Amino acid sequence: MALFEADGRLHHIAIKRGDVGRYVLLPGDPERVELIARRFDDPRFVASHREYVTWTGSLDGVEVSCTSTGIGCPSTAIAVEELAAAGADTFIRVGTSGAMQRDIRTGDIGIISGAIRDEGTSRHYLPLEYPAVADIDVTVALREGARKVGRRFHVGIAQSKDSFYGQHEPERMPIAAELGRRWDAWVAGGAICSEMEAAALFIVASTLRVRAGGVMLIFQNLDHRSPTAEERAAVDVERVIDAAIAGLRELIADDRARAASAGTAGVAATLGGGRAAS
Amino acid sequence: MTDDLQHHIALSRGDVGRYVLLPGDPGRCERIARRFDDAHLVAKNREYETWTGTLNGVQVSVTSTGIGCPSAAIAVEELVRCGADTFIRVGTAGGMQPGMQTGDLAIVTAAIRDEGTTSHYLPMEFPAIADLDVVLALREAARRTDVRSREGVSQSKDSFYGEIEPGRMPIAPALRERWDAWIGGGAICSEMEAAAIFIIASILRLRAGGVMACVGNPTMTPEEAAATMAAFTLDPVIDTAVEALRVLIERDGAPARA
């Protein structure tokens, strides 16, 4: 169980049980939280502590929240653990990432179906053989959301790394050769984008039997050239927020439909992937 | 036409459709193929038996992989060279979550790489993941066949007896600890081929998924699990896998959505 303070606030994210909805959007940057929450109905600031800023509002009549994770899997794992303790059970990471395939263009949307566990946090939870996989229902809703906003999108695997500069300036690292070989392997495996939080989000979510997914704005910089004016215009972060909000609305509608048919469709339909009927 | 004859599966381009069902047991191929129209035996070599027929007028096949990721990897590699690009593993598995019943279907969304083959392809950090559209087709198929199902992660192991008789292995504590970790992570079933099929599909940019008929659950003793087998039949999982091919054929043939 997550660590609560005497005043009922969670130790790191400084919110109380009930301060958030079951649906939480997770950007990395605390400064993006208000930007995202302004898309909710009746958004209100809940708390700010360390890198964790939380706002809550509603969408289509359902309480929803947005909490920043900070950069990296260590702080993301803490955010997810404490948000789940506060009552959340569905998480959507929203952020930016670098392209890992040539046919992906700056401004494209990436829907993360699974993550490469190229980080240190998730192995404190499960051996490395275990896949960091997104929830199917969340992924389907995000794909439909991306379709609805009319953006070019890709569904696939993200690299979740612990070192930003190890990716962007590998040549100056003492283990440059190894970084290069591993990057090439991820690309050959079909990974679509590189970011820093999804693996911990997915693995922690699996162990807590909660749902998680991710939607990314992708920057194409594989050839290290300067972006064109069109590309610069395309990197507006509003674009991925549009897709995340559209995806969340799809999910809320899908969950309503599933709850309505739960009596006939059985436990699996309401609990979704991998969650036990215990 | 024999110059591209594949070494292990004994097939050439054109012998199989783009859609291939992958049971482990060669003895199950004919039974599965009988659900196709115009099914005929194409080849049989080692543990690899292949039948081809049609569904909705489209060529489809079934090829056995044998037991384990080493032989499954060979089957997928060679089937791709014969023109296949969409795979559904179909078979039996052990149920891994409390509350699961013998006969429940597990639609595999991803696999634990608890095997030795896939580390010859990609570092262990890389997830073995099923194709989203194949998973959705299997889910739709389970709805149509009205079989109790759930989606989730499968453990793909290399040692059958390491799972069912861990106590007699010299590394018994490690086996038990890891088994408990997989259950803690939410894994729903244990089988022996999905990880290799998914990893190779990722690298070759193909689609793969799997549907397993589950036996027992971890709260049952082996005797209790065995007792549930009296009423067990493979028909629901085979029907669901075949129906999923129909769903994919329908969707692949449909005009692209806006």
Image: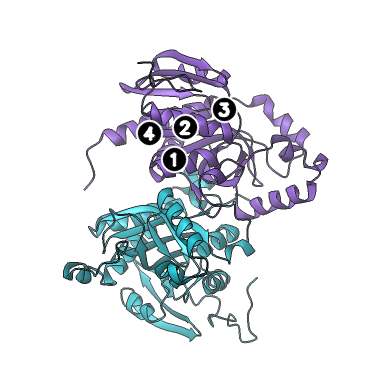
Chain colours: A cyan, B purple
Compare residues A221 and B142 and report the one nearer the observer.
Answer: A221
Q: Which residue is mark 1?
A: B201
* Labels 1, 3: front one: 1
In the depicted structure, whether residue B21 falls above or below residue B196: above
Label pair 2/1, CB-CB below 8 angstroms: yes
User: Distance from label 3 to label 2 (Cα)?
Assistant: 12 Å
Q: Mark 3 = which residue?
A: B24
Q: Label 1 lies in what chain?
A: B
Q: In the orientation shown, which residue stands out farthest toward the left? A: A229
Mark 4: give few (<14), some (14-19) or many (20+) Cα within 10 Å.
some
The location of residue B161, given as percent across then percent down, is 73, 35
Q: Quarter of the image for the N terminus of chain B: give it.
A: top left
Q: Label 4 sits on what residue type?
A: Asp
Q: Amino acid at mark 3?
A: Gly
**Residue topped by disc 2:** B76
Residue B80: name its quadrant: top left
Question: Residue tagged by mark 4?
Answer: B85
Label 3, secondary structure: give it.
Answer: loop
A144 or B15: which is nearer to us?
Answer: B15
